[in-house]
Amino acid sequence: MNGSKGVSLTRYLIEEQRAGRINGDLRLLIEVVARACKSIAHAVSKGALGGVLGDAGTDNIQGEVQKKLDVLSNEILIEANEWGGHLAGLASEEMDHCQPIPNVYPKGNYLLLFDPLDGSSNIDVNVSVGTIFSVLRCPDGVTEPNDEHFLQPGKTQVAAGYTVYGPSTMLVLTVGHGTHAFTLDREQGSFVMTQRDMRIPGDTKEFAVNMSNLRHWHPPMRRYIDELLAGKTGPRGKDFNMRWVASMVADVHRILTRGGIFIYPRDLKEPDKPGKLRLMYEANPMAFIVEQAGGAATNGYDRILDIAPSKLHQRVAVFLGSKNEVEIATRYHRETQ
Ligand code: AHG
Ligand code: MN
Ligand code: MN
């Protein structure tokens, strides 16, 4: 348990507040998000018995089919967060535009962004899914935020986290002072710290990528993966193993636990799109979490957290995880610029 036995999320957050690293509003906001994630965990775990599997019969703004759990998780997060008084607005992968806090409720200074249910393709086959969230400050003087107020680079995030609904439900969180993991104690109903200061090893022998897209990749991406596949007798001089859950939360969680590199590159399958994953709801929070654990995150060329967003639903290529691997993959891309 890493010397952290019995420290609940509530206690951890109060201690962070006492140390002057977060204020009371941010503490309560994270508590509310964690509570919403517990409700989602409950819904996910019921599976077919809860009638939550299958398609919702609608598409989101990206043209992706929404699952019932995408819609339900989105509703749970909105309902939990809109009346708490900590937020000025929220934005979700599943909503076309941001949603200001209704005027009947008090407003706060933060903006919340989330991917309510990550890994939708895995819901119906009983494989891990998750929730990803990011917290930004609302610009000074803005009480009715619109989409533009959310377009801040990832390095301005004040908190980010994800919950993975796996064999156990875990919440992984950073407020900019390390990355810590909490496991849901279902009897107590609370998240308990099970790993303080997660560290991603700099070197790895494991990569995560959807290999079925290989024929669509650009030359530097092909070169990088070819060298990994060449193993011991190739230029890298070691054998690599591969894993691909197809839920970013689960793949990133494995990398935080034992190292690795996660890649979703830009490719020629959809040449107009700069990648599949979303900058604001997936790449930015994960990059913050990974950097706080000693890892790195780029789009193949630049640090993810430095990217100035231009659209709420912007897509981006993602290379993240063990620092030395991310550096090699990024160097290959830069060399062919
Ligand atoms: P979402 O379910 O929120 O749309 O995200 C799915 C993402 C990500 O979780 C995962 O890494 C990736 O899509 C998997 O993509 P492929 O199905 O193309 O492998
Ligand atoms: Mn996702
Ligand atoms: Mn999603």
Image (spheres, rainbow, N blue to C red):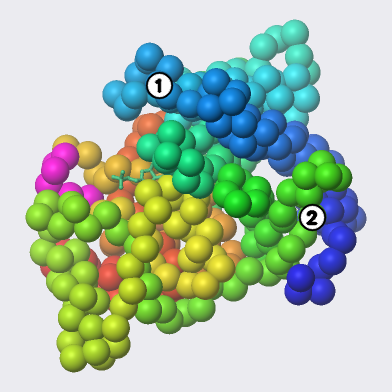
Q: Is residue 287 visible?
A: no
Q: What is the three-letter code of the residue carrying label 1?
A: Asp
Residue at screen point 46% across, 36% down: 123
- Give the secondary structure at mark 2: strand
Q: Which residue is more in the foreground, 186 or 89?
A: 186
Q: Which residue is more in the foreground, 150 or 79?
A: 79
Per the rendered image, the range of residues in magenta is: 266-271
Q: Which residue is more in the foreground, 68 or 327?
A: 68
Residue 12 placement (x, y as % from top left): 82, 56
Q: Is residue 232 visible?
A: yes
Residue 177 placement (x, y as % from top left): 69, 63
Mark 2 or 1: the one toward you: 1
Pointer 2 or 1: first along the chain: 1
Residue at screen point 22% across, 58% down: 211
Residue at screen point 40% across, 53% down: 245
Above/below status of 232 relative to 265: below
Q: Which residue is more in the foreground, 130 or 22?
A: 130
In the visual, does 177 lie left or right of 296?
Answer: right
Residue 271 placement (x, y as % from top left): 14, 42
Quote the CA–CA distance across marks 2 and 1: 33 Å
* Residue 80 lies in the magenta stretch: no
Position of the N terminus, as image quadrant, is bottom right
Q: Which residue is mark 2?
A: 192
User: Toward which corner of the image does residue 196 lie, by quadrant?
Assistant: bottom right
Above/below status of 25 relative to 77: below
In the visual, does 316 lie left or right of 101?
Answer: left
Residue 73 placement (x, y as % from top left): 57, 27
Above/below status of 54 relative to 112: above
Q: Which residue is mark 1?
A: 55
- Give the secondary structure at mark 1: strand
In the picture as drawn, the residue positioned furthest to the top comes out as: 104
